[in-house]
Amino acid sequence: MPSNRVSRLFHYGSLAVGLGFGALGEATKRWSGLGTLDSQSSSTSVFLTRANVDRIVTKLTRMRGAALKLGQMLSIQDSKSMSPEIAEVLQRVQNSANYVPISQVEKTVNRELGPNWRAEFASFNDAPFAAASIGQVHEAHLGKNVQEQVGFDKVAVKVQYPGVANSIDSDLNNLQSLLVMSKLLPRGMYLDNSIRVARRELHWECDYQREADAMTKFGALLADDPVFVVPRLVSDLSSKMVLTAEFMDGAHLKHAEGYSQEIRDYIGTHIMRLCLQELFDFEFMQTDPNWANFLYNDRTGKIALLDFGASRSFDKTFLDKYLCVLKAAMDGDREACRHWSTELGFLTGYEADVMTQAHVDSVLEIGKPFRASGIYDFGNQDVSSNVRSAIPVMLRHRLTPPPEETYSLHRKLSGAFLLCIKLQARVPCQDLFKGITSKYTFSDGAQLVY
């Protein structure tokens, strides 16, 4: 993995050159009539050839850091809002990550924990069992002294990739230039805002001390929860670039489709409950929707939470208005949806009628699960398709980007909805919503009464 700014700049430059030659070759084929019928479509960018798609995926997964993170952030955008080629790029990036060799891991851990760090472990597996955009994770067993101090033996040791933190700003600048040049993304996605949010979140996620604090906070918030469990931190073996925590057993929720309907309902119900609690009870949310961050233990019935780097709080004023939007959506009140969407910053008040209608329609669709009394069946829903149909209109006619808080918030909520759909879970959404939001206190001391 390239770890210094010069080598990373070289890789971005080589990607740009490769894309340029690929686009030139495709343009020549189209001009001469030698391209395929699909490639000759004027609606398909000359940059999005099969070879260029492969080039982008290969380079982003090797570069990791900002490149991989931005790709993963954008991959939650609905595929119908962009070309099939770029949707494929983002999906493949979302599912890809390569490991770095143990020699690079050794350098990082030696610097962070000292040259004798291995003496603190009874064993340390040099082969990682997981990798992501910022770092990779190794299984280990604590030495006897440390084990007696913390009360457990098996741990997961997350080690940050070298050079990632120092290259965030330059990587994102290079990526922005590349995306603008190639016109890979549709108009209306407000790339500048996506880059700004990615920049902030990457700096957060590269600070493992911040993540350790968030993990500890969630551990306290969920200490008495009957379903969710949080790994315990090994603070003496953690630093800004190394995070050591209790190893959690369980299966990723991305594999949960094979469970019985009862278990799928159970998982979906509690994931939805957690999202609402994070917003309107804890006022602190882990915003990464990756299903691999949730492990279901079929022996205990517990769901373990992992990866707290994207955790954040929200301003009270924002939460007040956001709850008003959701309440209006649950009530099916179009005028209230428009009013609170304007107050929150989704709308300016000067949009064309077609934009206002598309936005309100999509908000009302999101409120459908909470509007249904009793059990809402995510296996028989049309919310996702109805929201998708409004996206092209909003991309063409929106006058302002969404509030910055919603980039991470909607990533998490979308993840929860999509998980429930994937599981075909039956969830008492309205009961959950009313039970949790009725305890929320607005800035003026008011509370919702149902």
Image (tube, grey):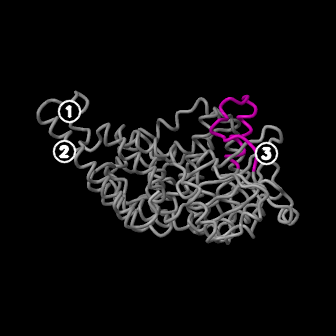
Q: As shown in the figure, which amino acid type bears the numbered disc 3? A: Lys
- Left or right: where 290 falls relative to 235: left
**Residue 313 in sight here:** no
**47 in relation to 142, above or below:** above
Spatial CA distance of label 3 from label 1 is 53 Å
Q: Nearer the viewer, mark 3 or mark 2?
A: 2
User: Considering the numbered disc 1 on the image, is that residue within a helix, a strand or a loop?
Assistant: loop
The residue singled out by tag 2 in the image is 24
Mark 2 or mark 1: whose residue is earlier in sequence: 2
The residue singled out by tag 1 in the image is 40
Residue 73: horizontal and vertical position, in percent?
48, 53
Asked whether 272 falls inside the magenta stretch, the response is yes
Q: Are marks 2 and 1 in contact (CB under 8 Å)?
A: no
Q: As shown in the figure, which amino acid type bears the numbered disc 2? A: Leu
Q: What is the quadrant of residue 207 in the picture? A: bottom right
Q: Nearer the viewer, residue 434 or 207?
A: 207
Residue 65: horizontal and vertical position, in percent?
48, 59
The residue singled out by tag 3 in the image is 302
